[in-house]
Amino acid sequence: MKTQFTTIIEPFRIKSVEPIRMTTRAERVAKLKDAHFNLFALKSDDVLIDLLTDSGTGAMSAEQWAAIMRGDESYAGSPSYYRFKDSVQELMPFEHIIPTHQGRAAEAILVSIFGGTGKHIPNNTHFDTTRGNIEASGAQAYDLVIEEGKDPSSLFPFKGNMDLAKLEAFLEEHGDAVPIVMLTITNNAGGGQPVSLANIRAVSQLAHRFGKPFIIDSCRFAENAYFIKQREEGQQYRSIKDIVRDCFAVADGMTMSAKKDAFGNIGGWLAFNDDDLAEKARVRLIQTEGFPTYGGLAGRDLEALAQGLHEIIDEDYLKYRIRTNEYIVERLDKMGIPVVKPAGGHAVFVDAKSWLPHIDPLAYPAHTVAVKLYELGGIRSCEIGSVMFGRQTDGSEKPAAMELVRLAFPRRTYTQSHADYVVEAFEMLQAEKDSLTGFKVIKEPKLMRHFTCEFAPL
Ligand SMILES: *Cc1c(COP(=O)(O)O)cnc(C)c1O
């Protein structure tokens, strides 16, 4: 007798829909040529299922749309700011909450305070905009994730953890040249893998022992907390909110992209406890973003985020969210397609280096998969490999640690049948993969080339 459900349903129903425009394979072949094989250059209405990013692409709730009507557009002291600030402080108990138009603006302000030539900034893995901001200031960015985090097949539960021995050695070696210690939760560039609460606390202790502020890049804090609840000894019976608060209680500041775990289409913030740091940040904010009670945002955006932060810690939502990725990872794994395991929080990562060993890393196997996936199914994904990280600051090119294809799921946007369609596209790709030959870059900018560079097939 059946007494338990095994189907995890989307914990929402749909009030408003956006049609998907269907395209043929022949049309998509032409679109790829027009885009010089860079998926960022596609028009999004030529995409059937857009898994390029989970950033700002989620569906807002009815309550968020209602909150938008409450938006107060006063230049200074808007009640929308105070609702936003209270919502943030309920989860992240920092003194100073400084809104920005998105995460990278918060990073730019952070780096304007702490970056500069000769500085060395460690992280588990810097995200591309974080690295870009640091390097543009003349400082150097270092990735000190644990070894398990670089092994796509390792089943270690917290593959986003910082390597504490490496961090300690790093702090001893570089001394005063290290202005801050950063930690990214979840570790986006390393497969969306979580960081344990124990590791967050240990990194904080190490940073403080060496007198360095500890800053969390917090974009997917709720997904990270859900993993802590599922996987970390002693956390099973705690609320997501309590776990989140514990994570931030040991930090001196945070950067945030509210386009991720705040259910926003735009937004971000920077937070500090220290008054002097906050003052420096606000001076910069006024120069680059706006007055401190709106940052680069409209009052209505702040309202949407204030409400979004209440919704993001809902466990039924997080369960469905994480399960979507697990489901696809299980199905691809059964087909023999190498995927990063365990499934990450916001995305499925296919290990293109193992799947297409006949393509040299500098012929971009992950980019090759992403292009083919669009051609076959109109699915847009994102390369996280040597296109994104291969170009070095000295101008040379070196293979990235991993060649990943990221299928990032917008929040509350796609359903089970969309997931099944993605799996079918991989079945087709499996049959064609041995005939693929890779790409070369024919035109690129100086920094962060993956957004705008042009490719030619080899
Ligand atoms: C998205 C992201 C950022 C940058 O935020 P934006 O809002 O896109 O500017 C920084 N760090 C991580 C880990 C991210 O995922």
Image: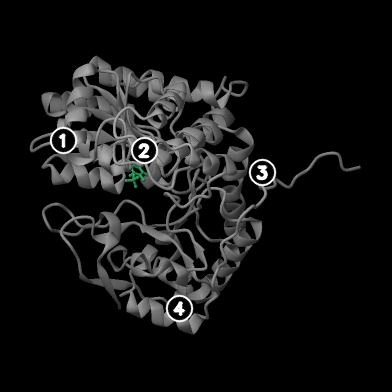
Badge 2 element: loop
Q: Position of residue 418 (x, y in %)?
A: 60, 61
Which residue in the structure is indicated by mark 3? 11
Of helix, strand and loop, which one carries label 1? helix
For this rendering, which residue is in front, 126 or 164?
126
Residue position marked by numbered label 1 in the rendering: 112
Counting from the top left corner in percent of width and height, residue 447 is at 18, 55
Q: Earlier in the sequence, mark 3 or mark 4?
A: 3
Say what amino acid the circle numbered 4 marks.
Arg
Question: Label 3 to label 2, Cα distance in Å?
Answer: 33 Å
**Amino acid type, label 2:** Glu
Q: Earlier in the sequence, mark 1 or mark 2?
A: 2
Alpha carbons under labels 3 and 1: distance apart: 42 Å
Residue that numbered label 2 is attached to:
73
Q: Is residue 4 left or right of residue 225?
A: right
Name the residue that disc number 4 marks.
28
Q: Amino acid at mark 1?
A: Ser
Whichever of labels 3 and 2 marks the residue nearer the N terminus, that label is 3
The CA distance from mark 1 to mark 2 is 28 Å
Q: Tell whether circle 4 marks a residue whose Cβ is less than 8 angstroms from ligand 1.
A: no
Rate crowding at label 3 as few (under 14), some (14 to 19) or many (20 or more) other CA atoms within 10 Å.
few
State which tag comes first along the sequence, 2 or 4: 4
Of callouts 3 and 1, the N-terminal one:
3
Q: Quadrant of ligand 1?
A: top left
- State the separation of the CA atoms marked 2 and 4: 43 Å
Dot 1, crowdedness within 10 Å: few (<14), some or many (≥20)?
some
Residue lying farthest to the left in this orientation:
117
User: Type of residue at label 3?
Assistant: Pro
Label pair 4/1, CB-CB below 8 angstroms: no
Please tell me whether mark 4 sits on a helix, a strand or a loop: helix
Q: Is residue 438 visible to us here?
A: yes
